Amino acid sequence: MITATTSREPVIRGSWLHEGMHIASIGAPEVNARELDDDTIRKASVIAVDSRVAVMNETGDVIIPIRSGLIHENNLIEIGEIISGVRQGRLGGE
């Protein structure tokens, strides 16, 4: 599933998801905008980002759940860390 919106309200609901789904959320580029609801974030086994610094400054899908305590900045894995083998991405079909 890919989202690329300017929505301020979530357009993806965790209740729609099943195990093994991949979501590429590339919209919501504002601190108060979201494409993903809390349930979606809660169900994520991996939250891969291009840059922790960038998303912590401009992405509501990450900033809002961190501020509410749902996730922590340590839950974020930079794509470069996965590619270089420093951190692991998805395991099998999860």
Image (cartoon, rainbow, N blue to C red):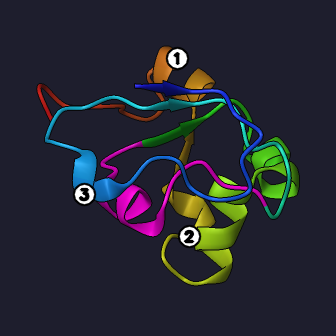
Q: Which amino acid does label 1 sit on?
A: Ser
Image quarter of residue 23:
top left
- Magenta segment: 33-46
Of marks 3 and 1, which one's residue comes earlier in the chain? 3
In the rendered image of this protein, does residue 46 appear above or below residue 78? below
Residue 5 in picture, x, y percent from top left: 70, 34
Q: Distance between the residues labelled 3 and 2?
A: 22 Å
Q: Is residue 23 left or right of residue 49?
A: left
Labelled disc at residue 72? 2
Q: In this view, does 69 lie to the left or right of 40?
A: right
Q: Are marks 3 and 2 in contact (CB under 8 Å)?
A: no
**Disc 3 crowd, CA 10 A, few/some/many (<14, 14-19, 20+):** few
Q: Which of 94 and 28 is in front in this view?
A: 28
Queried whether the magenta region covers residue 41, the answer comes back as yes
Image quarter of residue 94:
top left
Queried whether the magenta region covers residue 54, the answer comes back as no
Q: Residue at x 76, y 56 (%)?
A: 33
Of marks 1 and 2, which one's residue comes earlier in the chain? 2
Q: Distance between the residues labelled 3 and 1?
A: 33 Å
**Disc 2 crowd, CA 10 A, few/some/many (<14, 14-19, 20+):** few
Which residue corresponds to mark 1?
84
Q: Which residue is drawn at 82% across and 47% down?
A: 53
**Viewer-side label of 3, 1:** 3
Q: Nearer the viewer, residue 60 or 45?
A: 60
